């Protein structure tokens, strides 16, 4: 029962505002390869192990004593590998990151905290996430700079930070916060701590990722439709929404990359009549991933040259979710255990 509950959290977080985002850093030839962050069930202990994979070869970040999840991956200019995530102890979740496999805890563990994004800027390491406050237990959206927390919200309402980017010394964080007026989730991002609201709070909306391209800010996510309540996959460019789905089925936009003025977004659309849910949009054009059969969700996207990589998970017959990585629509890496790929970086 515990295992299934944890797995449900994984799958929900893949399509909710708990996404993952990696560091966009300069190319380093010695670090070239396909890097994926995720988790895999250890059948011996019945716990999830946080891991990353380089070109399909796994590196375990935890020992299986407690459930642990890797949510984002990045590589610094120096070639160091950073993975963000969290690990449960006996009572709480501890936000952390790993540098070349060495764990760095970001909170004391007396309150739940989670890390969902990591980026490096020179020698500085930024991690986005959220932590419960000690007054009312609500989550505070925040980021940590070299381990020092920077709060983005005041703790009055639940708030979550899901992705982080640095551009020209400016810190951008995507997240969402519960409205104290309507009780709905409001999509937003913060620029150097200043809040920019993307939705009006009349319908639930969530962000999952963001990217900075020149003077333009792109944020991915999803929002309930005006009348149906069905979630619409969309992105916001400088605050203006662009819909990717039409409210017929629940749609989710979970990751974004911009290359040569082309916008690539990974996500899913939950059509109950077909097993193929994973897709990516290229400048708004829908591209279903043909290699996906019973896919639960897509977690992230990466582009290198003409190649498009999408990671996520697919439902199995004997396990509830199996990690998948598709390259140009064809299966590249897969696990047949209970597992999930959360983030990808190709260098």
Image (tube, rainbow, N blue to C red):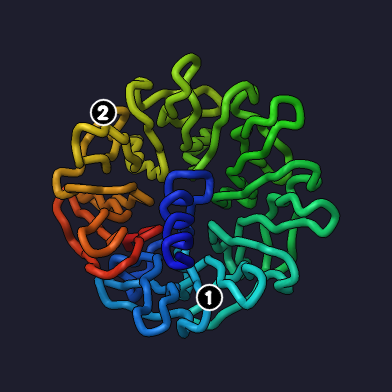
Point 49% across, 35% down: residue: 218
Give left or right: position of 190 versus 280.
Answer: right
CA separation in Å, label 2 and label 1: 36 Å
Depicted 58 relative to depicted 111: above or below:
below
Q: Earlier in the sequence, mark 2 or mark 1?
A: 1
SS for callout 2? strand
Q: Is residue 325 above or below residue 289?
A: below
Quadrant (top left, top right, bottom left, bottom right) of the N terminus:
bottom left
Write the residue at 74% across / 62% down: 149
- Residue under pointer 1: 98
Q: Nearer the viewer, residue 252 or 249?
A: 249
Which x, y percent locates residue 161? 62, 49
Residue at 55% in and 63% down: 120
Tag 1 secondary structure: strand
Q: Crowding at label 1, few (<14), some or many (≥20) Cα neighbours within 10 Å?
A: some
Pick whichever, 128 or 252, lies toward us: 252
State the quadrant of the C terminus. Answer: bottom left
Residue ranking furthest to the front: 1
Residue tagged 2: 285
Residue 81's disc number: none
Residue 60 position in % (x across, y down): 40, 80
What percent of the width, then of the height, locates residue 237? Answer: 49, 29
User: Residue at image x 53%, y 75%?
Assistant: 98
Above or below — where is 169 with respect to 334?
A: above
Where, by quadrant of the figure, is residue 36 drawn? bottom left
In the picture provided, is 263 more to the left or to the right than 216?
left
* Left/right of residue 169 with respect to residue 26 in the rendered view: right
The answer to whether one can see residue 79 in this image is: no
């Amino acid at each position: 029962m515990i295992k299934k509950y944890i797995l449900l959290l994984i799958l929900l977080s893949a399509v909710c505002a708990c996404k993952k985002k990696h560091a966009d850093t300069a190319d380093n030839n010695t670090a070239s390869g396909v890097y994926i962050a995720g988790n895999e069930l250890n059948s011996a202990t019945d716990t999830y192990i946080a891991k990353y994979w380089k070109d399909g070869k796994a590196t375990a970040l935890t020992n299986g004593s407690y459930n642990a999840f890797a949510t984002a991956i990045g590589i610094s200019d120096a070639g160091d590998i950073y993975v963000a995530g969290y690990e449960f102890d006996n009572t709480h979740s501890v936000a952390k990151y790993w540098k070349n496999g060495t764990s760095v805890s970001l909170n004391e563990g007396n309150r739940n905290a989670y890390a969902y994004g990591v980026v490096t800027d020179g020698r500085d390491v930024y991690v986005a996430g959220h932590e419960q406050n000690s007054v009312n237990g609500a989550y505070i959206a925040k980021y940590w700079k070299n381990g020092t927390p920077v709060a983005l919200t005041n703790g009055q309402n639940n708030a979550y930070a899901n992705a982080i980017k640095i551009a020209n010394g400016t810190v951008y964080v995507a997240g969402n916060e519960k409205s104290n007026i309507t009780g709905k989730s409001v999509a937003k991002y913060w620029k150097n701590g200043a809040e920019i609201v993307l939705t009006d709070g009349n319908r639930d909306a969530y962000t999952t990722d963001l990217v900075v391209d020149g003077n333009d800010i792109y944020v991915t996510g999803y929002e309930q439709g005006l009348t149906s309540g069905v979630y619409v996959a969309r992105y916001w460019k400088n605050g203006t929404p662009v819909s990717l789905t039409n409210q017929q089925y629940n749609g989710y936009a979970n990751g974004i990359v911009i290359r040569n003025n082309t916008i690539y977004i990974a996500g899913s659309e939950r059509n109950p009549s077909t097993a193929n849910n994973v897709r990516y949009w290229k400048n708004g054009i829908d591209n279903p991933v043909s290699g996906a059969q019973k896919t639960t969700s897509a977690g992230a996207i990466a582009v290198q040259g003409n190649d498009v990589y999408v990671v996520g998970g697919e439902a199995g017959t004997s396990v509830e979710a199996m990690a998948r990585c598709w390259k140009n629509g064809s299966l590249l890496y897969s696990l047949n255990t209970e597992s999930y790929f959360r983030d990808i970086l190709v260098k």
